[in-house]
Amino acid sequence: SSLRPADELARLGGDEFAIMIPSLESRAELEVLASRLVEAVVKPYEIDGYQIRTSISIGIAIGPDDGNSADDLLIAADLALYAVKAGGRGSYKFYQSSMSKEFNERRQIEIDLREAIERNELELYYQPIVDLRRKVITGFEALVRWHHPVNGVVAPVTFIPVAEDSGLILPLGEWVLAEACRSAAKWPNDFKIAVNLSPVQFSDPNLLSTIERMLAETDLAPNRLELEITERIFMDSGEVTLTTLRRLKQLGIRISMDDFGTGYSSLSYLRSFPFDKIKVDRIFVSDLGEGTEHMVIVQAVVSIANALGMTATAEGVETDEQRQILVGLGCDEAQGYLFGCPVPIAEVSEVIDKWATVKTLAA
Ligand code: C2E
Ligand code: MG
Ligand code: MG
């Protein structure tokens, strides 16, 4: 009903549709149509007495500039659609040539990454997490690094999203888990090992059994493994994810909420699952001491964590002033360059030794 008689609507498959608009006066006209479609679709439906909400993302390509054939136009529209989804869905975007460039770069990363996993170009770095009151290491977070043969070290922010989109995160994530458990099992103390899990890994029906197998194979006590998830996990998935989380917790594994405060409706997510730890994102830590409202936010998160029996861990602590403020706020743990940068496995024992001395001095 939003379309004109000459416009053509087709279903491409699944939940994908295409609209062909044969004659067009201006781009503005398309903007009006796109907003109208977005508004029409987000209106809640009532089905069998339930309110159902959905959303729509629209990519727009205009011939002949964006493509001369139907195929090329569909590809361009698809790239624009992809950009909408990456930006948070529920909106529309026009195709731009930069989207092709970005797409090709991502394709190349995907091709290289597939090989990297087979060629063992991935390595785990370990960053200490310390107890602020006792001044001891409580564990390490495993952070993946990619040694690209041409481009050098590639940061996870560049390749994790590509790995998630391409499904490569499943073999990659499995490798990270196995490697982290193997390393931690050899450490002299019962330090915890924190491993980041992508929401995409929760779509793998074998996730639980894989983790159980790794714990058994490495003989690592489940309560030494901490899985870090972000609020993103609750955006697309529902009950299945929660069930998996509960079963992981039943095994004795600890679950942390990572990057807390950067996603949406954080507080309701905290209620939906009994997390063991909240990691306060470094955005809030970075300007502590500069008289910003972030101090109040950190204080509030620490209070919530305390009240709910969770550990509060501050991320990205770089200065002693930040450390002192965090101690004052009653924050339990911290992680950051002030205490130690992520290091390769060979340097972990040095870090442990150094901290053992700190403890002796403090005592
Ligand atoms: P994250 O889990 O929040 O990890 C903390 C990030 O902050 C790490 O970046 C770490 O190097 C960095 N960092 C630590 N201390 C400081 C500090 O004092 N100052 C500043 N500016 N930064 C600090 P990294 O290693 O680049 O990782 C970025 C993100 O990539 C991680 O954020 C995590 O979400 C993701 N990631 C890393 N490894 C894995 C992995 O094995 N699997 C998955 N799914 N994601 C991973
Ligand atoms: Mg993390
Ligand atoms: Mg984090």
Image (spheres, rainbow, N blue to C red):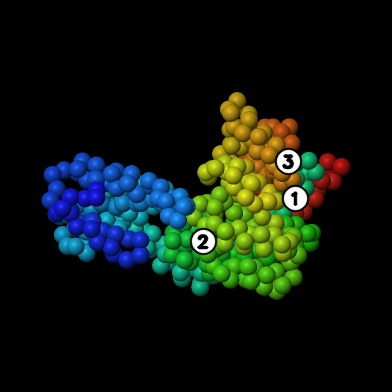
Assess disc 1: are there few (<14), some (14-19) or many (≥20) residues with their C-alpha within 10 Å of its C-alpha.
Answer: many
Tag 3 secondary structure:
helix
Tag 1 secondary structure:
strand
Tag 2 secondary structure:
helix
**Residue 180 image position (x, y, % from top left):** 65, 63
Assess disc 2: are there few (<14), some (14-19) or many (≥20) residues with their C-alpha within 10 Å of its C-alpha.
Answer: some
Q: Decide which of tag 1 and tag 2 comes sooner along the chain.
A: 1
Tell me the quarter of the image containing the C terminus.
top right
The amino acid marked with disc number 3 is Asn
Residue 137 is tagged as 1
The amino acid marked with disc number 1 is Ile
**Residue 2 image position (x, y, % from top left):** 24, 48
Q: Which residue is drawn at 16% across and 43% down?
A: 26
Q: Is residue 316 left or right of residue 56?
A: right
* Observer able to see residue 39: yes
Is the residue 171 above or below the residue 239 in the image? below
Q: In this view, does 272 lie to the left or right of 149?
A: right
Q: Decide which of tag 3 and tag 2 comes sooner along the chain.
A: 2
Q: Do the residues labelled 1 and 2 touch (CB within 8 Å)?
A: no
Q: Name the residue under label 3.
A: 306
Q: Given this view, does label 1 or label 3 mark the residue nearer the observer? A: 3
Q: Decide which of tag 1 and tag 3 comes sooner along the chain.
A: 1
Give the CA distance from mark 1 to mark 2: 30 Å
Is the residue 316 above or below the residue 291 in the image? below
Q: In this view, does 88 lie to the left or right of 21?
A: right
Give the CA distance from mark 3 to mark 2: 30 Å
Q: Mark 2 points at which residue?
A: 200
